[in-house]
Amino acid sequence: MAGTLLGVGAGVFILALLWVLVLLLCVLLSRASGIARFSIIFVVLGALIITSVLLLLPRASEFPIPEVEVKIVDTFFIGRYVLLAFLGAIFLGGLFLVLIHHILEPIYAKPLRSS
């Protein structure tokens, strides 16, 4: 069973993610006022349509394909680590600049009240 996790395929996780997002969006829209509150109906109907399309039109075939041993070779191994090091350096530099900006922010004295 290639492409399965916990005994189920990716479609189950896609449907679960879809409905979790729909429920979250419904909770957020229920706090809205006016006409925006009624858009929950369209969100649920859209999720029902997407779910029915995903259930009625599966991409996998009914008959399993005989498995052939596939040798996977990572040809971009060094480039990936160079890119990772570059992005890490950019992240650390940006973090350093943000912290310096907040640490070195001037604190202005409050004017004294004249009596």
Image (spheres, rainbow, N blue to C red):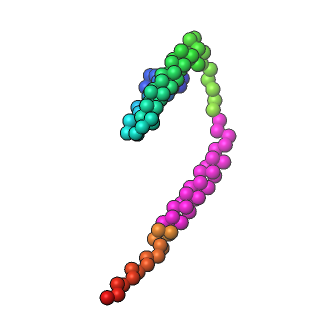
Q: Position of residue 35 (x, y in %)?
A: 45, 35
* Frontmost residue, 82 versus 50: 50
Q: Quadrant of residue 71?
A: top right
Q: Is residue 83 magenta?
A: yes
- Pick the quarter of the image with the C terminus: bottom left
| Residue located 37% across and 39% down the image | 31
Q: Quadrant of residue 27?
A: top left
> Furthest-front residue in view?
34
Report the number of discs: 0
* Residue 75 horizontal side relative to residue 108, left or right: right
Is residue 29 at all visible to an observer of this figure?
no
Relative height, residue 75 to residue 20 (above, below) = below
Q: Position of residue 19 (x, y in %)?
A: 44, 28
Relative height, residue 15 to residue 91 (above, below) = above
Q: Is residue 89 magenta?
A: yes
Relative height, residue 57 to residue 3 (above, below) = above
* Frontmost residue, 5 versus 51: 51
| Residue located 62% across and 20% down the image | 68
Is residue 35 at all visible to an observer of this figure?
yes
Tell me which secondary structure the magenta stretch mostly adopts: helix
> Furthest-left residue in view?
115
Q: Position of residue 15 (x, y in %)?
A: 47, 25
| Residue located 35% across and 87% down the image | 114
* Frontmost residue, 57 versus 48: 48
Q: Quadrant of residue 60?
A: top right
* Frontmost residue, 51 versus 45: 45
> Furthest-bottom residue in view?
115
**Bounds of the magenta span?**
73-99
Relative height, residue 82 to residue 110 (above, below) = above
> Furthest-right residue in view?
75
Q: Position of residue 81 (x, y in %)?
A: 61, 49
| Residue located 56% across and 63% down the image | 93
